[in-house]
């Protein structure tokens, strides 16, 4: 995959943490998030979390993520993010719904460093294919649908559902 800028790395013991409201606006970002992404707290609080979305992150994967968490379920996902300066960094994200007095109130994401062999050998080729489908379509909606269908084919061919697929990747590398 083609990335502008350079890849930014963080230490294995560091966790990137953020919290959003129900519309995905950032309400909390820890110091690791701010340091890696290159923003100040004032620049991100109240902004959409997609402020750090990298152009090479397939929309179909984000759609799966949002569909999962808005139904009250957690998800693990490999994500490439963009820094304020245009560099990028990979994470293994664990996103969970947050509740207040029994009502869904937002989302909590903890990201850790992914295995770079997994990124290189599995995720980049799959995401590259999904991106090509999205970018090669006449409109955004059609591209996301084609990409979603292709990713479902990959899961079906693997004999696993999404959670099993990601869990296997997390164990194998």
Image: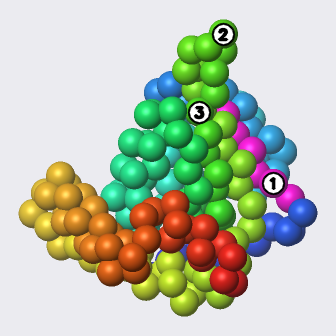
Residue nearest the observer in this picture, 118 or 82: 118
User: In the rendering, at what x and y percent does residue 80 appear?
Assistant: 55, 65
**What secondary structure is found at the residue carrying circle 2?**
loop
Q: Residue reaching furthest left? A: 138
Question: Which quadrant holds residue 135?
Answer: bottom left
132 to 140, vertically: above or below? below
Q: Nearer the viewer, mark 1 or mark 3?
A: 3
Asked whether disc 1 touches disc 3, contact meaning CB atoms under 8 Å apart, the reply is no
Give left or right: position of 125 versus 110: left
User: Is the residue marked by circle 3 packed among few (<14), some (14-19), or many (20+) residues within 10 Å?
Assistant: many
**What secondary structure is found at the residue carrying circle 3?**
strand
Please give the residue where the numbered disc 2 appears in the rendered image.
101
Q: Could you tell me how far apart the alpha carbons at marks 1 and 3 are, in whole angstroms? A: 18 Å
Please give the residue where the numbered disc 1 appears in the rendered image.
15
Q: Could you tell me how far apart the alpha carbons at marks 2 and 3 are, in whole angstroms? A: 13 Å
Res 168 seen here: yes
Give left or right: position of 106 versus 38: left
Q: Quadrant of the N terminus?
A: bottom left
Q: Quadrant of the C terminus?
A: bottom right
Q: Residue reaching furthest right? A: 13
Task: Please name the residue shown 55% across and 21% down the image.
Answer: 104
Which region of the structure is painted magenta? 14-19
Asked whether disc 1 touches disc 2, contact meaning CB atoms under 8 Å apart, the reply is no
Task: Please name the residue shown 54% across and 89% down the image.
Answer: 121
Q: Nearer the viewer, mark 1 or mark 2?
A: 2
Please give the residue where the numbered disc 3 appears in the rendered image.
97
Q: Could you tell me how far apart the alpha carbons at marks 1 and 2 are, in whole angstroms? A: 27 Å
User: In the rendering, at what x and y percent does residue 77 appear?
Assistant: 55, 60
Dominant secondary structure of the residues highlighted in magenta in the image: strand
């Amino acid at each position: 995959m083609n990335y502008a800028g350079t890849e930014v790395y963080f230490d294995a013991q560091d966790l990137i943490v953020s919290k959003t409201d129900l519309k995905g606006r950032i309400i909390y970002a820890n110091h690791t998030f701010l340091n890696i992404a290159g923003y100040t707290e004032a620049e991100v609080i109240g902004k959409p979390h997609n402020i750090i979305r990298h152009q090479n992150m397939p929309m179909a994967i984000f759609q799966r993520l949002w569909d999962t968490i808005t139904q009250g379920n957690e998800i693990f996902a490999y994500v490439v993010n963009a820094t304020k300066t245009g560099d990028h960094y990979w994470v293994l994200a664990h996103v969970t719904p947050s509740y207040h007095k029994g009502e869904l109130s937002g989302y909590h994401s903890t990201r850790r460093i992914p295995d770079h062999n997994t990124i290189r050998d599995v995720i980049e080729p799959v995401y590259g294919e999904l991106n090509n489908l999205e970018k090669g379509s006449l409109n955004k909606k059609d591209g996301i649908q084609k990409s979603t269908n292709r990713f479902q084919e990959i899961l079906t061919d693997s004999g696993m559902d999404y959670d099993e697929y990601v869990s296997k990747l997390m164990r194998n590398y």
